[in-house]
Amino acid sequence: MASQFVLFGSQHLISIASIFLISVLFSLVIKGLNIKSITKTILLILGITLIAHELIKPFYRVIYYDHSIYEVFPIHICHLAALSMGIYILTKVKFFFEVAYFFGLTGNLLAMVTPDLDYSYPDPEFITYYFGHGLLFLTVFYVCICTDVKLTWWSVFRVFLFAACLLPAIYSLNMYLVEYYSDVNYWYLMITPAANTLLDFFPAPPWHIPYLALFTVILFTAIYLPFKYLNSYKQTSF
């Protein structure tokens, strides 16, 4: 029987550590094998699985977890990152990787660190939650380590610009859907989550939006710097 979820409890920390270790070690092993057919096949499997899971997720959330249909649209940061990564793998359009990288290593990572969950393992919602977020995390690492994709400062700017242009649309959708479901909260623009998150340190919505914008710039810059180091590392390794 699943126990109450404890933020930074043993199950929470083990889950995060396991996802990180699997993502890094698996990617390094495949990179070390240096067999293009295997690398490409795994990449394709990851991409298809990401898209398939995001398309299936709204249905099992409504049917099995009793979530409202109004709160399961795949438009949260994590959902957009997963779909973008899957599309990038299938199309090789670089912009989709940029979105997946910056959204996946900010919103997705923060979602794993401060999840909005009621119960721990083996609760099905806990398992599917960390499966989806962990799969995206793994795929981001895999693409960074096993392929020759590149990022630049222009990547940082245009993903931030994309997010800034998308934000009014997400806020407007929230305002429309709240008429039908009071707890709708895409991008957490309407309500501060009940779980302990970094949003607790910001003003109440929607006055937290300017602070979120500044925080996003800082986060995007912070996660771009390790990529620059990784590119240098790949050029001198394997």
Image (cartoon, grey):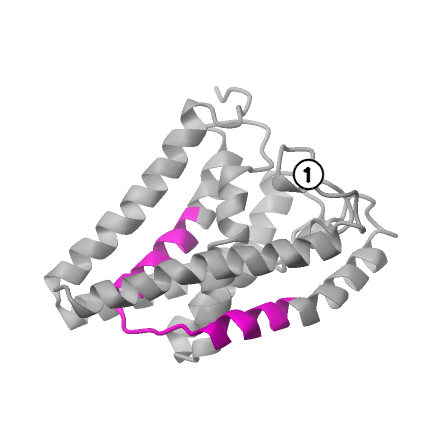
Give the residue at x 72% y 45%. Answer: 68
Q: Is residue 186 left or right of residue 80?
A: right
Give the residue at x 47% y 56%. Answer: 222
Q: Quadrant of residue 43?
A: bottom left
In the image, is residue 144 part of the stretch drawn in magenta?
yes
In the image, is residue 52 part of the stretch drawn in magenta?
no
Looking at the image, can residue 159 be seen?
A: yes
Mark 1 crowd level (few <14, some 14–19, many ≥20, 10 Å Cα): few
Whether 19 is drawn above or below 10: the answer is below
> What residue range appears in magenta?
134-163
User: Most prominent secondary structure in the magenta stretch?
Assistant: helix
Q: Which quadrant does the C terminus fall into?
A: bottom left
The amino acid marked with disc number 1 is Phe
The answer to which of 11 and 144 lies nearer the viewer is 144
The answer to which of 14 and 225 lies nearer the viewer is 225
Q: Quadrant of residue 114?
A: top right
Q: Position of residue 16 (x, y in %)?
A: 40, 38
Which residue is under mark 1?
201
Q: Secondary structure at mark 1?
A: helix
Give the residue at x 65% y 52%. Answer: 72
Give the residue at x 67% y 68%. Answer: 164
Q: Position of residue 131 (x, y in %)?
A: 43, 45
Furthest residue to the right?
179
Q: Position of residue 199 (x, y in %)?
A: 67, 42
Q: Position of residue 198 (x, y in %)?
A: 62, 40
Whether 150 is drawn above or below 131: the answer is below
Looking at the image, can residue 82 be seen?
A: no
